[in-house]
Image (tube, helix red, strand yellow):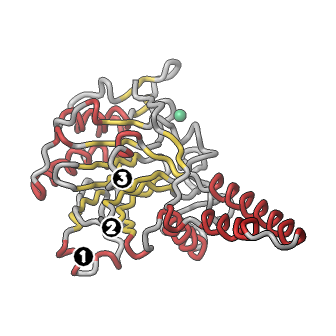
Amino acid sequence: MLINPKYQVVKYWPLQKSPKIKYLTYGVIPFIYPTHVEVDVLFLILLMFFVFKMKNLTETFPLYQFQNLSRFSKLLHFVTTRFGGVSIAPYNSLNLGLHTADNTAHVLQNRALLANKIGIENDKILYASQVHSGDVKIIDDEAVADGILKTNPETDAMVTHIPGICLMVMVADCVPVLFFDPVKNVIAVIHAGWRGTVQKIVSNTIAAMKTNYGSNPSNLIAAIGPSIGPCCYEVGEEVKNCVADSFGTIQGYMIKQKESEKYNFDLWHSNHKQLIDKGLRTENIETAGICTKCNSDTYYSSRASGGITGRFAAGLCILKT
Ligand SMILES: [Zn+2]
């Protein structure tokens, strides 16, 4: 039910910064003014080289988008994969998590590559220090004046109305959730692992948007990104008890394995249910339905790698007009 075929890969490439266009311009000029055959042949070879190079670049740095958020031209949003970076195994290759044991220089280079790719300056991309809490941070004018963009705020959800700031959430099995309120022009990103999910961080974020910006949940557009699915997320008694305490039941939240007494936690349903309970409309919610453990060749998965791996990211930004 939650699988969404609309979630798709896009080759995001801002036109104003496109080297492809630059290279094509250089290549075409000699054909407009043909003087020597050798020069034309040389430029033809160069043109083929650059086109091949750009084709490779665009194919090796895929960014995924949700159909429901893609409708809004004022937004930039994306989900990264493992591809396009410089980190080496087991962090290969676009690891964006500085809190991993990867080479810090490689992670910083990966962040710079992403910034260049999406056309937003690195110092306008805000990565939180995620602490598996249920806390929400408002990135308002006061916070920016206090220098929050130069820090990594300790939080697992961030909300802002300020154009040009790209809010980022990093995951490797945990659930990235993105919100947009098209009426109040407010965005939010959420990192919801099992701890954040049972602390109802999704509900907390909606409450924070209502309190701080007057958001009406029925207007919110929500997207639930790739994360460990109910197919793979086996958990122990501690998590099962927390789910029962938080939601009042495990019915629908936990799935009993067929041939054992163990349970899998359905993070997708648990976060989707919070959205519905808070008043979002079903048609405004899009779930990627992609399990990171089943697809660990494309996405980082903590479970698939024994905990030693990188982080991919989901980002959301209101573009400056
Ligand atoms: Zn799976």
Q: Nearer the viewer, mark 3 or mark 2?
A: 2
Mark 3 or mark 1: whose residue is earlier in sequence: 1
Image x and y of residue 254, in percent = 36, 28
Image x and y of residue 252, in percent = 32, 25
Mark 3 or mark 2: whose residue is earlier in sequence: 2
Secondary element type, mark 1: helix
- Which kind of residue does numbered mark 2 sit on? Ile
According to the picture, the residue beneath numbered tag 2 turns out to be 165
Residues tagged 3 and 1 counted as in contact (Cβ below 8 A): no
- Please indicate whether residue 55 sits to the left or right of residue 34 in the image: left
Q: Nearer the viewer, mark 3 or mark 1?
A: 1
Q: Residue at x 35, y 45 (%)?
A: 69
Mark 1 or mark 2: whose residue is earlier in sequence: 1
- Which kind of residue does numbered mark 3 sit on? His
Q: Is residue 238 visible?
A: no
Based on the displayed image, in which of its 4 quarters is residue 316 positioned? Answer: bottom left
According to the picture, the residue beneath numbered tag 3 turns out to be 191
- Please indicate whether residue 253 sits to the left or right of residue 59 in the image: left
Q: Residue at x 21, y 55 (%)?
A: 185
Q: CA distance from mark 1 to mark 2?
A: 10 Å
Based on the displayed image, in which of its 4 quarters is residue 91 positioned? Answer: bottom right
Badge 1 density bin: few <14, some 14–19, many ≥20, Cα 10 Å = few
Residues tagged 3 and 2 counted as in contact (Cβ below 8 A): no
Badge 3 density bin: few <14, some 14–19, many ≥20, Cα 10 Å = many
Of the pair 170 and 284, the residue shown nearer to us: 284
Image x and y of residue 10, in percent = 53, 47
Q: Is ligand 1 less than 8 Å from the beta carbon at label 2?
A: no
Q: Is residue 112 above or below residue 47?
A: below
Residues tagged 1 and 2 counted as in contact (Cβ below 8 A): yes
Q: Is residue 104 visible?
A: yes
Secondary element type, mark 2: loop
